[in-house]
Amino acid sequence: MSMFRTLLCALVASVLLFSNAQAADKLIVASDACWPPMEYLDGQKNVMGYSTDYIKELVKETGLQMEVRNIAWDGIFAGLIAGQYDIVASSVTITPERQKQMGFTIPYYQVRQAIVVKKGAACTSLADLKGKKVGGQIGTTGIFVVQAAKCDAIIREYEDVGLAMEDLSNGRIDAVVCDGPVAGYYANKKEGFANKFQVAFKTGETEDYGFAVQKGRTDIIEKLNKGILSLRAKGVEKALIAKWMGE
Amino acid sequence: MVPERVAKAEKKDWAFINAWSLSLFGAIAALFTLCTLWPEPYLDVLSFLPDGLFVTFEVTVLSISCAVPLGLLTGLGRISKNRAINLLASTYVEIIRGIPLLVQIFYIYYALAKFLQVSGLTSAVIAISFCYGAYMGEVFRAGIMAISKGQSEAARSLGFNRFQTMFYVILPQAWRTILPPVGNECIAMLKDTSLVSVMAMPDLMQRGRSFAAKTYLYFETYTIIALIYLIITLLLSKGVSFMETRLNYYDKRK
């Protein structure tokens, strides 16, 4: 019995120690690593990309300890709201609906939505998508833009944008909607797709990326905002843009 | 049949209170209460889902109508004395049973797209009915083997051929043992259709996910989704148990 009690105490103590150590040390950053070149996996399963580099620079700049983890997009905000991690750095567009649920930093990048089609397909505006099958990643602003345009497109929502691109390449859908840099990456750089796709057009309205945190965590937001401003002033941001979005 | 010490519900004696009716009316009451008291999120979720429900039904009905014949064929193949047929059926069961349904769906939809492109609905029906056909094959085999050998010997001595023996003598009796587990598989199948959302099929689950992804109302959305799945599986299970009572004419004779 006493043996059992000792074991139990040890177990409880170690659990407490472990969870404390984790919570106190580092801020956990969630990124859905399937959104190249903003955040994606390299060959060694490390998360890399523009957002990831930005976070690394912010660590140097602000002294906040942060660790990036790969978290699936569908439900990434639910996890943040539930407190499973502290920051979402996953090309999150700041929208009024999202601001009701979460806190955001100042913008760290600006994009427009882009439509990717097979090379040679005629498509120049959202109206041309009428009756076409348009794929995208579930819960992304690209899907919302096509829905809001009411252009009678058949919208198909995929787990991640890579699967939508795969289906575009297979001819099961006619177009994919996603953020401009991602569209450019698939149309120009991604092996196997680059010669098959083209960016048909970009929508007019710009969207701002922000880092999302739990509502009320103004302490984190203030530090990050300060960091973003000084990275911008030092020209680090510009260098990162040149590195990842160059050409 | 029922041992004496097992509590049996008497006809007059609150027989309508059982696990099934409690769950069903509980679920319906919960759904109704949520939608009337807080129409703002809950009724919005509900009105977003009907086309998803239709896709779920479509996939389920098509898969059941393919899986049951496939299961019967597999079961017959597994007890066949012809070595080639037996080997074919057994290999099919071993392979399919060893691969998760989600992997099969990805394989048929995304991997095989390199050679052959099938629509989301077709891939879903193929993957699900192949998977459940293998499970059901084992159920059919067990059910058929449970019928005593005397039955087929008697039928053969009366001049029935092997085919007639199976279809007029063995199978009608085996149905009684086969039906409950097959019904169970059908219910499991209905629930597993939620996996097709990975192929961007707009089924009930996918509709819920896209609603939640847009509104961030995760609790409200998945509460409604869970209640709807519960209600339809409960109705399906009642259908199965109704068929069971219809088939249990031997027990009723006392």
Image (tube, helix red, strand yellow):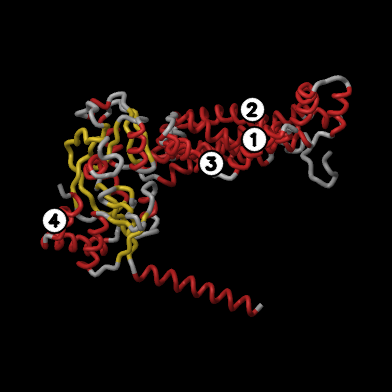
The reply to whether discs 1 and 3 touch (Cβ–Cβ < 8 Å) is no
Determine if marks 4 and 2 fall on one subunit.
Answer: no
Residue B88 is marked as 1
Determine if marks 1 and 3 fall on one subunit.
Answer: yes
Judge whether residue B33 can be spotted in this image: no
- Kindly report which numbered mark, 4 or 1, lies closer to the viewer in this rendering: 1
Earlier sequence position, callout 1 versus callout 2:
2
Earlier sequence position, callout 2 versus callout 3:
2
- Tell me which residue sits at (22%, 64%) in the image: A223
Q: Amino acid at mark 2?
A: Pro
Element carrying mark 1: helix
Residue B101 is marked as 3
x and y, in percent, of residue B97 in the image: 60, 42
Earlier sequence position, callout 1 versus callout 3:
1
Element carrying mark 2: helix
Judge whether residue B167 can be spotted in this image: yes
Mark 4 crowdedness (10 Å alpha carbons): few <14, some 14-19, many ≥20: few
Q: Amino acid at mark 3?
A: Leu
Is the C terminus of chain B in the top left, top right, bottom left or bottom right quadrant?
top right
Q: Amino acid at mark 4?
A: Lys
Quarter of the image holding residue A119? top left
Determine if marks 1 and 2 fall on one subunit.
Answer: yes
Residue A238 is marked as 4
